[in-house]
Each structure stands twice: as C-alpha cells, then as structure tokens.
Image (tube, rainbow, N blue to C red):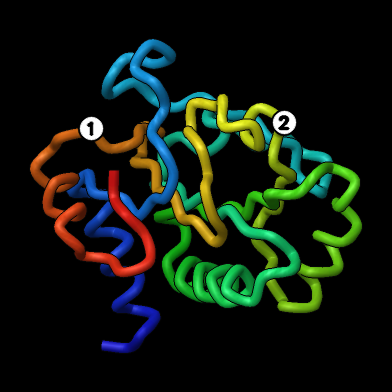
Amino acid sequence: MSLRGAVFAVVTALASSGCFVREGEPARASERAAGEPVQFTFGTLQGEELSSDTTRGRTTALLFVTTYDLPSQAEAQLLRDVLATHKPRANGVIVMMEPPRAADLAQVWAKSINVDLPIAMASPTLMSGDSELGRVNGVPTLIVLDRRGRLPRPGSKNSSRCRRGSFRTSSCH
C-alpha cells in the first residue's frame, strides 16, 4: 500500500471509529451537548463561507496551520494529496492560525506549496480558544469531524485507545 493510501486508510478508520487526531482541549460540555455537531463558520480567502453546514454530509479534515512553519507545509501537501485521490468522500480545509491581515500571505503560501484546498483565516473566537472546536495549542493540528460534524465522544473506547499512545505528535480526544 502506498503512503497516500495508508494515510487515507488511517484518517478514514479514525473518522469511522470515533477516534480523531487532535491537539488542544475539547469544547466545554456546557457549550455543546455530547454528540451534537460542532458549529463553526469561517470566511475563505476566495470570499466564500465555510461552515459546519457547508461541510456536513462528508467526513471533514480541518488542518490548522501557519505560514511560517515547515511542518504545516508538509501536512497541507499530504492532506491535499490524500484528498485528491479520494474525492468526493471527504472534505479538507486549511485554517490559518494567523490574524486576518495575513490573508495575502496565506494566498502566497498556498500557491507556493501548490495547495488548492479551501483556506480560511481563523476567527477571533477560535484564536482565543472559545470556539466549539476547542483550543488549538500547536500547529499543525488536524481535527477530523464525522459526516454529521461531530467530535468524538470523550471516554469512548476508541478515544481511550488513542490516548495510550497511538500517535507520537498528536493526541486523540
């Protein structure tokens, strides 16, 4: 199996089993009932709205990156390659964890690494850690939402298995 196929198999298995690669903290229970879809809205660099409603119906990979980080470039290219061979089964979105004034830089970044996925600038709510997606503590961070737009249930069998060390650089919640 090729690396691309292996990565897609892992992302698909994680999405279908309720185990998701994610850094940061889950949203507080008071903000969202367990098992309910996460609500988010971002504006893309193309001027379109990207939201939980526009991505619902497909597994969605949200990749949080910065323009000045080499691992972010590598992860964005890997996500692009995986999704290119497996459309229309999954969505992929790059979310820049930089202020809106960096939008021009984000466009140049995407063009320079040949990534054609939708790119959104992080909202102030996300940057402060107050969004339903929780706090993004580092980049690159990949959050995979299921077809209904849900994060995994805390304490699920698959969530516990991930915490035992399945991933070296990211933790599953």
Q: Residue sitting at 68 percent across and 53 percent down?
A: 118
Q: Is residue 105 left or right of residue 44?
A: right
Q: Residue sitting at 23 percent across and 32 percent down?
A: 153
Q: Residue sitting at 79 percent across and 78 percent down?
A: 112
* Mark before the other along the chain sequence, 2 or 1: 2
Q: Is residue 154 left or right of residue 94?
A: left
x then y, percent, for residue 41 = 64, 29
Which label belongs to residue 95? none
Going by the picture, which residue comes out furthest to the top?
30
Please, what is the three-letter code of the amino acid marked with disc 2?
A: Pro
Q: Is residue 134 left or right of residue 64?
A: left
- Residue 61 vertical position relative to residue 109 in the rendered view, above or below: above
x then y, percent, for residue 64 = 58, 53
x then y, percent, for residue 166 = 20, 65
Residue that badge 2 annotates: 124
Characterize the local packing of mark 1: few (<14), some (14-19) or many (20 or more) Cα atoms within 10 angstroms.
some
Which label belongs to residue 153? 1
Q: Is mark 2 on a helix, strand or loop?
A: helix
Please, what is the three-letter code of the amino acid marked with disc 1?
A: Arg
Looking at the rendering, which quadrant does residue 148 occupy? top left
Going by the picture, which residue comes out furthest to the left?
157
Number of numbered markers: 2
